[in-house]
Amino acid sequence: MAARALVPVAILLVGAFAGCLEEGKGTDLAVDPLAGTPEGALLALLGSLPEPDFDRMKAVDWWEKFVKDNDMRQYPLPKNQLASTTLESELRSAGFQARIMYNFGGVGYQGTNVVPAQGNTPFGFKVVQGLKEGTGAKDHRLVLISHFDTVPSTPQGAYDDGSGVAVQLSICKLLAKVAMNKTVECLFFDNEENGLLASQAYANWYAQSKPQWKWDQAFGYDMVGLNWPGYSKWKLYSMIGKPTTEPDAFLASHNDFLDVLAYDYLGPKLNVTTDGVEVLRVHDRNSDEQNFKRVGIPVVRFAGGRKAADYPQYHKEQDTVEFVYRYACECQDLAKGKETFARGYELVVLMSYYTILAYDQYDPKALPF
Ligand SMILES: [Zn+2]
């Protein structure tokens, strides 16, 4: 793949940018060997993005409190409602237009019953939505997805999917501070565990009612943080989902885009290599993003674990904060485990931040690698 062959050059280029920025000299490179190439255009864009101000321990503290305060949050228990209002107010204080959308009456989850936030009834399946309007192509949305409900067997649902909710909220808070071309839509779904029902209703509503705006790209988070560089047994997997089964051309441009981003740009910055992060040519995880793929929306999924069942407490009672910490460090020292988990969590947040901002500027198909 072309991007791989360019790694040494890309490292030099990014190094040069970093040096210039540190010394406040601007980016007047004498020679830009990638000028005019897709890799060069993408790397130049990434080099110009604002550095995120992210505190990983504070973020993990929030996750810990969220899963403990909102234990037993399966539909339709009271904590299910509490979790949704907590997320709504978090989004609002981060600067999003926030609301809870209800699927009225629990009838026919075919989309027609999804009413975007007119009513305020506490019944039905919920989607917590944060919107931040873009400054340019505001009818184009980049959508982030996770689920806040749990299965009855996992009171805390710390990893499934407290981790995805917290990571996504961290990313959305960072994106709220950056001027963006497209609109960001930050979605937390109810009833994933009962058959992806809330996302199914919303995706069907989108397909049937054809709103004025369009989803360009979705980003999915379900079970993340237990991954390199904290957790040592497995990598972070980035998966690219395609809406249909045929077009390899579609996958190829997305994969090349992510390769440049992960290895050529974040390589020198975050020490990302193929040993720590793998960009897979497949998306085979069953979660809410399946409904987005079904209605034609390409999906990038970040996964801390190749399969859900790789995590030993998947849908089991001990899917708890304490277990995640012990599992992260393979030790009994909870403080050490917390730091280890936080490092994996941070990688997902930072990789997502840059990936989403790159997608804000480019359609991968517009960069023929
Ligand atoms: Zn899940």
Image: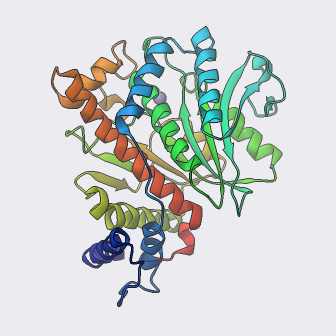
Q: Which quadrant of the figure has residue 10?
A: bottom left
The residue sitting at the bottom extreme is: 30
Q: Is residue 77 visible?
A: no
Residue 320 percent across, percent down from the top left: 35, 18
Q: Is there any visible trace of residue 278 in the rendered image?
A: yes
The residue positioned farthest toward the left in the image shown: 331
Q: Position of residue 174 (x, y in %)?
A: 51, 46
Q: Who's the residue at 41% across and 44% down the image? A: 54
Q: Residue at x 25, y 45 (%)?
A: 229
Q: Relative to residue 131, is residue 83 depicted above or below?
A: above
Q: How many marks?
A: 0
Percent of width and height locating residue 91: 61, 35
Q: Nearer the viewer, residue 341 or 189?
A: 341
Q: Quadrant of the C terminus?
A: bottom left
Against 313, residue 357 (above or below) is below
Front-most of 19 and 336?
A: 19
Quarter that holds the N terminus: bottom left
Q: Residue furthest front?
A: 24
Q: Is residue 283 left or right of residue 263?
A: right
Q: How is the image coloured?
A: rainbow
Residue drawn 32% across the image and 63% down it: 263
Front in this rendered view, residue 307 or 337:
337
Query: In the picture, residue 192 is in which quadrant?
Result: top right
Q: Quadrant of residue 159?
A: top left
Residue 76, position as x, y percentages in the image: 63, 12
In the picture provided, is 1 more to the left or to the right than 326?
right
Residue depicted at x 82% and y 44%: 209
User: From the viewer's perspective, is 145 left or right of 237?
Assistant: right
